[in-house]
Image: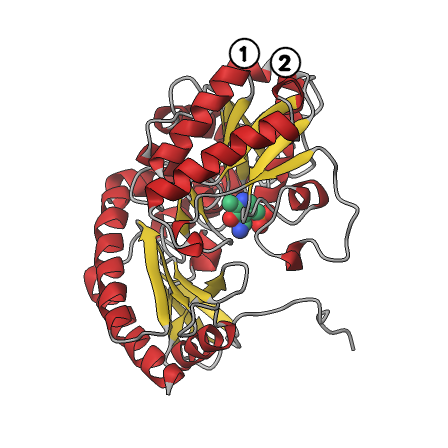
Amino acid sequence: MAQLSPVLKQATPVLAARGEGVYLYGEDGRRHLDFTAGIGVTSTGHCHPRVVEAAQRQVATLVHGQYTTVMHRPLLDLTDRLGEVLPPALDSLFFLNSGSEAVEAAVRLVRHATGRQNILVCHGSFHGRTMGAAALTTAGTKFRAGIGPLMPGVAVTPFPFAYRYGWTEDEAVAFALRELDYVLATTSPPADTAAVFVEPVLGEGGYVPTPAAFMEGLRERADRHGFLLVADEVQTGFGRTGRFWGHQHSAAVPDVIVTAKGLASGFPLSAIAAPRALMEKAWPGSQGGTYGGNAVACAAAIATLDVIRDEKLVDNAARMGDRLLAGLRTIAERHPEIGDVRGRGLMAATEFTTVTGTPDTALAQRALTESAERGLLLLPCGAHSNTVRMIPALVVNESQIDDALSVWGEAVEAAVK
Ligand code: PMP
């Protein structure tokens, strides 16, 4: 009898039968408060009726209008609709299936557009697991170990992770920009540098909001040296951070946006967006894939945009995010084992450390387990998996935030005993 490969590592023992809003129901009938949202994907909640209805209608109409063979209406309509929420200059879109694929498409694009090879990435970033995207990923050795050699032409520059350095944010930004200049002077000369990729909030690397001054410093270097700024908004896009795009917490407008996850409420869909003048430099036919821009996924994405607009989910994410973060901080005050609480919008994290400030992975794991046993599903993040993150659907309400906080308070209490 065939079995699932042990390569699959699952964060919780739940066997999910159905989902509704911020809740998942196990096959055993148990209800779980889902603060993972499928790793930040089910932006409108599980099975939002309007998304379900749009997808069902599309399934019965056209499932696979293969886009390198024929065009289909949902893809054209979604392109129009994304034009309304993207920075106006980023008026050209291309669709794929996953975040990793879109990251790789962005690598091709920036190399074609600049004629340069090197990609700069920030230390601790996560850009995906496919081999090209893995070369850009330094969020933990588990994503790289034993699979190399990886794609060359990637230079790593520090991320201003103030808590890790034990500095103020200003000190961390000044250091990271100084080191970036040093990397450009020593390792990846501007004439060889195609782009810098950055997450507006460091995601898998520990839920660290990227300071506005750092984003703006990257923008300034990109302009000065003629390379491109790519915002990997796979996790931060679609209202997740309390603004529509994560980069909107700064004045820096990227040249390329990579998006996926929240875009289609759970259907596999991703996209890259850039000015048409840049996209024109890519070689026609150099991007694509059998399943990219699937018609059902596009219909779900249009419905997702409708729901985000009509239910004012970006504002809700900002308000609920503030409530969540404030509650996490109150809990942290009771526990010296919590070294840091941070976040932006509905990306909130609690980092566990020992009294000497060393990452405490075992304690974070105990807190995750205690929490799951009490019906609250959470995920770890950070290089040492010692940070617990909360990413509920954007439809989460006050009483669900308070329920989660009360379970989390108990879970931490039990874990530190
Ligand atoms: N970039 C970022 C910022 C991500 O958070 C992720 C997924 N966690 C990816 C890229 C890769 O996306 P996918 O898993 O869909 O390939």
> In percent of the image, x 63 and y 17: which residue is there?
114
Measured Cα–Cα span from mark 1 to mark 2: 7 Å
Q: How is the image coloured?
A: secondary structure
Q: Nearer the viewer, residue 316 or 293?
A: 316
Q: Nearer the viewer, residue 106 or 343?
A: 343
SS at badge 1: helix
Q: Identify the residue position indicated by label 2 in the image.
A: 281
Marks 1 and 2 in Cβ contact (< 8 Å):
yes
Q: Is residue 300 left or right of residue 189?
A: left
Image: 312 above or below 286: below
Place residue 101 in its image quadrant.
Answer: top right
Q: Identify the residue position indicated by label 1 in the image.
A: 277
> In percent of the image, x 37 and y 55: which residue is there?
45
The dot on residue 187 is none
Amino acid type at circle 2 is: Lys
Whole-percent x, y for residue 308 in the image: 31, 42
Image: 368 above or below 252: below
> In percent of the image, x 63 and y 41: which residue is there?
136
Quarter of the figure with the N terminus? bottom right
Amino acid type at circle 1 is: Ala
> Could you tell me if residue 170 is visible in this image?
yes
Whole-percent x, y for residue 212 in the image: 34, 35
SS at badge 2: loop
Image: 223 above or below 59: above
> Could you tell me if residue 60 is visible in this image?
no
- Mark 2 and ligand 1: say if the CB distance to the nearest ligand atom is below 8 Å: no
